[in-house]
Image (cartoon, coloured by chain):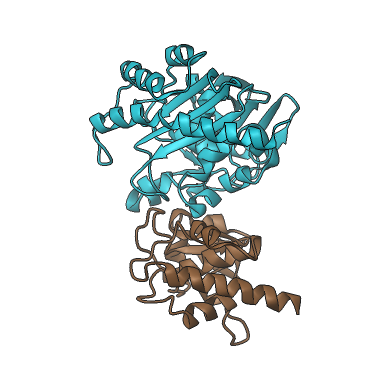
Chain colours: A brown, B cyan
Amino acid sequence: MNISFHLNGRPVTVRVPSGKRVVDVLRQDLNLTGTKEACGSGECGACTILVEGRARLSCLMLAVQLKERHVVTIEGLASGGLLHPVQEAFVEYGAVQCGFCTPGMILAAVDLLKRNPLPSGEEIREAVSGNLCRCTGYARIVDAILAASRRMARGKKR
Amino acid sequence: MNRVHLPRSLEGAWEILDRVPEARVYAGGTDLFVKLQGEARSRAVLVCLERIRELRGIRDAGKHVWIGACTPYTEILSDPSVQEHFPVLSDAIRKLGSPLIRNMGTMGGNICTASPAGDTLPPLYILEATLEIRSHSNTRRIPVQDFILGPGQARLEPGEILSGIEIQKGHPYPVHFYEKVGQRQALAIAVVSLAVMMRLSEAGDIEAIRMAFGSVAPTVVRPLPIETQLAGAPLDEKTLREAGAMLQAHLFPIDDIRASARYRRRVSANILQRLRLRGKASMKDSHRFGP
């Protein structure tokens, strides 16, 4: 069947078999391999995407559920050749090691900062508690999100 | 052929269920798609309820609050009437899954999945929630504890859809809490869980209490004799130790990958001691903010 939705700001239509998951459509049909799959059961957060601005697990959604929705993947976060402030902070703070959890982690953080522009460290830890990282020990990830939040808040004031 | 349906109304959902009685119904998919993988997923006929407006939202109806069965947990958490009247439910939802799971999962799903470990179930049992179940021709209401029969088994007839959860307001229990013992903080399935609502006297004794345990039997356990026993008792170590011993007759736990039955029994008894901490904390609060 054909499904039309908005992906990273552009309208797309894909032909997908019934029962195909969102993560598979993104990676196989749309060639957006930034969205990762690890556990396939909602426990690791590597497949996180934004649907209508909210972080969701693309391994537990069928493609048909995207019909007419606005979807953002990690590929759609940078704009005009500039990284999103959360991406920038991840680079700056060394919050990336193997990088597998990074797309999901960043999108979960983007969702958080939209609802809560100046979160505490505790609130950040809670917000990314569904995104597992096996490399960094999380400290730098939390630092990066904290730094991004401050930078974004300052940017808004100006 | 399209096997996955996204109806916009209950009428639309019933129309599919009439035509394809074996169709499976889901909302968030956080449970279904863990189990339904590969070939089985591409062959299944599925009805996703997430776009049906009639099944979403939270309404304060005066004496009770109605929560749409397909309202994602995140929305329930941010609702002021839920926070005000049912803190034990908010507490349990905050400890359920992860933020990502809570953005997708729904209470209707938690109830129909009928897992002994379902985090919203112990609170719903002590809040004595009523479920609203709709079909083409009928709407019926049933107490949550009569709806759930065992692991994965619920009293849902073909063509019926759990549409909402009704919870009475004005429970005379100021202290609410949900304790969950799991293998880690986020994304843990409960090894033992306990939902409590209680009222303490000025001296700090238990005046009245309701409690329900999860993950210790095929369904949630609400040990009414213990509630009765504890009413009027002092909130001390000895009382709770005795209650923990009495409790054992009400538990039917199993050994599984998460814990042994023996461990579940022991934790269920020990977790009752948390009542003292929560009781003390609430006394402090009432002194601080009291008249």
In this orientation, which residue lies closer to the viewer: A111 or B137? A111
- The answer to which quarter of the image holds residue B220 is top left
> Residue B22, can we see it?
no
Q: Is residue B236 above or below residue B19?
A: above
Where the C terminus of chain B falls, by quadrant?
top right
Residue at the (48%, 12%) spot, across then down: B228
Residue at the (26%, 38%) spot, across then down: B259
Number of numbered tags placed on the structure image: 0
Q: Is residue A135 above or below residue B144?
A: below
In this orientation, which residue lies closer to the viewer: B266 or B115? B266
Horizontal and vertical percent position of residue A45: 43, 60
Q: Is residue B65 left or right of residue B20?
A: right
Horizontal and vertical percent position of residue B243: 38, 18
Q: Is residue B272 above or below residue A18?
A: above
In this orientation, which residue lies closer to the viewer: B180 or B271? B271
Q: Is residue B102 left or right of residue B60?
A: left
> Residue B77, can we see it?
yes
Horizontal and vertical percent position of residue B209: 52, 20
Q: Is residue B163 above or below residue A17?
A: above
